[in-house]
């Protein structure tokens, strides 16, 4: 009897979530169709040369014919993005934990991180290629990890430090150890900040790897493919590669959003999205 009641209750909830997903996705879909239609109309109406701006239909045709090659190139780029994202995230969280443990150094360290983050990180690509080798995945992942490290450090440190004074005083009154305060109070408070940084860092990692591949890389990497097609010049194929790179960044952002929902389902931002 109770099972039937539970299934009846779950159906409206599932239908409500599906409806909310459709309501969120429909404006995006309509906007994309309008933009692509206007793009196609302008290119055809004013006869814009393909080396300036190819029509979406040309890009779609190039994507269809080059899809196996582009997917093969994306495989190498995805590995570099994931490696850079993991390295940069782990390093950022570890340094943030140290900063939260020693409050006196938090100000100078975070200020220095912000200053270094303002530097043109992309300029490091030739240097990393020289250090690790042009075709080595470590040179691409190294630039991506640097681009991920600073947002993760600054945002996670902010979440670790900005805990409720009342909660902190309560745990200290109960003689909680610094390790227990970090695990039970600071880390849960920092999770929303961390995932905001990861969503930003995941797209930055894609940009970092693609741009680094412009300076050299394996012959079948996605950034090398785009640069090669643009140099020929085969701009429809180059735009097809750019389109796949954009999808890769969107997929990484979606992956971080999914992890956020799985690891912190209690947070109010998750429920506000479903409302």
Image (tube, rainbow, N blue to C red):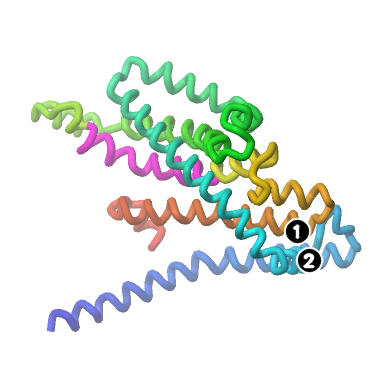
Asked which secondary structure carries label 2, the reply is helix
In front: label 2 or label 1: 1
Above/below status of 21 relative to 209: below
Q: Which residues are magenta?
A: 182-203
Checking the image for residue 1, the label placed there is: none
Give the residue displayed 37% in from the left and 30% down from the top: 157
Residue 115 spot, x, y in % from top left: 54, 22
Confirm whether the magenta stretch covers residue 201.
Answer: yes
User: Quick check: 176 left or right of 216?
Assistant: left
Give the residue displayed 32% in from the left and 24% down from the top: 98
| Mark 2 → mark 1, Cα distance in angstroms | 9 Å
Q: Residues within 10 Å of mark 1 (few under 14, many from 20)?
A: many
Give the residue displayed 44% in from the left and 43% down from the top: 198
Residue at the disc numbered 1: 237
User: Quick check: 235 left or right of 138?
Assistant: right
Above/below status of 267 relative to 19: above
Q: Residues within 10 Å of mark 2 (few under 14, many from 20)?
A: some
Q: Which one is in front, 23 or 226?
A: 226
Q: Is residue 184 visible?
A: yes
Residue at the disc numbered 2: 58
Q: Which one is in front, 135 or 93?
A: 135
**Which residue in the rendered view is the most extreme toward the left?**
174
Q: Which one is in front, 173 or 178?
A: 178
Q: Quadrant of residue 99?
A: top left
Residue 116 spot, x, y in % from top left: 54, 23
Considering only order in the chain, which callout, 1 or 2, is on the residue closer to the N terminus?
A: 2
Q: Quadrant of residue 275?
A: bottom left
Residue 111 spot, x, y in % from top left: 47, 20
Give the residue displayed 69% in from the left and 41% down from the top: 214
Asked which secondary structure carries label 1, the reply is helix
Above/below status of 160 relative to 21: above
Above/below status of 105 relative to 126: above
């Amino acid at each position: 009897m109770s099972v039937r009641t539970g299934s009846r209750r779950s159906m409206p909830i599932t239908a409500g979530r599906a409806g909310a997903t459709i309501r969120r996705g429909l404006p995006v879909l309509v906007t994309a169709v309008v933009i692509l239609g206007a793009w196609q109309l302008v290119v055809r109406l004013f006869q814009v040369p393909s080396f300036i701006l190819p029509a979406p239909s040309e890009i779609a045709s190039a994507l269809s014919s080059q899809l196996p090659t582009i997917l093969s190139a994306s495989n190498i780029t995805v590995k570099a993005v994931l490696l850079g994202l993991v390295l940069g995230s782990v390093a950022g969280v570890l340094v943030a934990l140290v900063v939260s443990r020693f409050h006196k150094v938090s100000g100078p360290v975070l200020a220095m991180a912000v200053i270094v983050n303002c530097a043109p990180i992309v300029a490091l690509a030739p240097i990393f290629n020289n250090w690790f080798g042009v075709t080595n995945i470590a040179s691409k992942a190294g630039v991506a990890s640097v681009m991920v490290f600073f947002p993760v450090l600054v945002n996670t440190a902010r979440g670790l430090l900005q805990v409720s004074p009342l909660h902190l005083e309560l745990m200290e009154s109960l003689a909680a150890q610094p390790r227990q305060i970090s695990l039970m109070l600071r880390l849960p408070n920092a999770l929303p900040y961390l995932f905001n940084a990861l969503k930003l860092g995941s797209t930055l990692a894609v940009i970092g790897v693609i741009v680094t591949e412009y300076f050299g890389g394996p012959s079948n990497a996605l950034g090398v493919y785009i640069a090669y097609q643009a140099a020929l010049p085969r701009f429809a194929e180059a735009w097809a590669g750019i389109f796949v790179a954009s999808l890769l960044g969107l997929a990484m952002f979606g992956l971080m959003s999914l992890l956020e929902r799985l690891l912190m389902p209690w947070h109010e931002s998750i429920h506000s999205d479903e409302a």
